């Protein structure tokens, strides 16, 4: 399956800024910072109480100039809220066959997280071939992705977790890496 065209989203954005928003008052400044860096994409993590409110605000105010995604998706309620808001993509830190149907039915592009060969195989059995490699820094980083490229040649990855400005291009040089996620540009 196409994962609701996640490749279409990621192929436009070599870097996906991963942002945790603690206050609605931060939103405009964050978007301005991304625009100044010529980045037109944001993944807002669902780690704070204001996350959904911030996502709604970004989608309403900036949705015509930035692809808005939600990260840390771990349950169906979050997927339903994403549908209501109309986000452009969803990111999960892991893979879960119980959420597979909800992700597919949402109509929203999505990318599940994997770290191990078993999780990659699970994704492949679900018909998914574009995966978040997370946390990349704890599971072998570039060397792991080189190996996964040989073992799973039909799978492409978006490594996230420990990717920084110094390593982003090295990750992006791998033929099985479609984009990278990180938060270094927000510092």
Image (tube, helix red, strand yellow):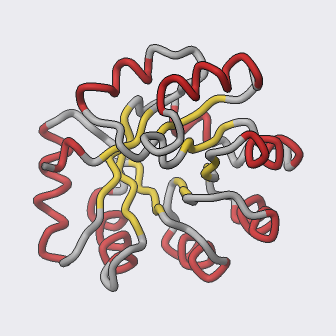
Where the N terminus falls, by quadrant?
top right
Left or right position of 50 against 131: left
Residue found 39% across the figure and 55% down from its top: 43
Residue found 42% across the figure and 41% down from its top: 137
Residue found 52% across the figure and 23% down from its top: 143
On screen, residue 169 above or below 93? above
Disc tally is: 0
Q: Nearer the viewer, residue 167 or 187?
A: 167
On screen, residue 37 above or below 52? above
Residue 152 in percent (x, y) is at: 76, 25
Picture quadrant where residue 30 is located: bottom left
Residue 75 in percent (x, y) is at: 64, 77
Picture quadrant where residue 101 is located: bottom right
Residue found 67% across the figure and 78% down from its top: 76
Left or right position of 178 against 167: right
Is residue 1 at least partly visible in the picture? Answer: no
Is residue 49 at least partly visible in the picture? Answer: yes
Residue 142 in percent (x, y) is at: 48, 25
Left or right position of 14 against 132: left
Residue 183 in percent (x, y) is at: 27, 48
Picture quadrant where residue 47 is located: bottom left
């Amino acid at each position: 399956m196409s994962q609701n065209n996640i490749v279409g989203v990621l192929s436009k954005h070599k870097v996906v800024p991963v942002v945790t928003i603690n206050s609605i008052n931060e939103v405009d400044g964050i978007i301005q910072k991304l625009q100044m860096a010529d980045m037109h994409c944001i993944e807002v993590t669902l780690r704070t109480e204001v996350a959904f409110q911030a996502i709604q605000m970004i989608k309403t105010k900036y949705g015509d100039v930035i692809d808005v995604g939600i990260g840390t998706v771990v349950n169906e309620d979050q997927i339903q809220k994403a549908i209501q808001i109309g986000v452009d993509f969803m990111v999960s830190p892991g893979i879960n066959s119980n959420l597979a149907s909800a992700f597919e039915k949402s109509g929203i592009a999505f990318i599940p997280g994997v770290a191990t060969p078993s999780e990659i195989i699970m994704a492949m059995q679900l018909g998914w071939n574009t995966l978040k490699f997370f946390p990349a820094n704890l599971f072998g980083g570039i060397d792991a992705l080189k190996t996964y490229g040989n073992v799973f040649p039909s799978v492409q990855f978006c490594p996230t977790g420990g990717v920084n400005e110094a390593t982003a291009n090295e990750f992006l040089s791998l033929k099985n890496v479609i984009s990278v996620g990180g938060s270094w540009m927000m510092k």
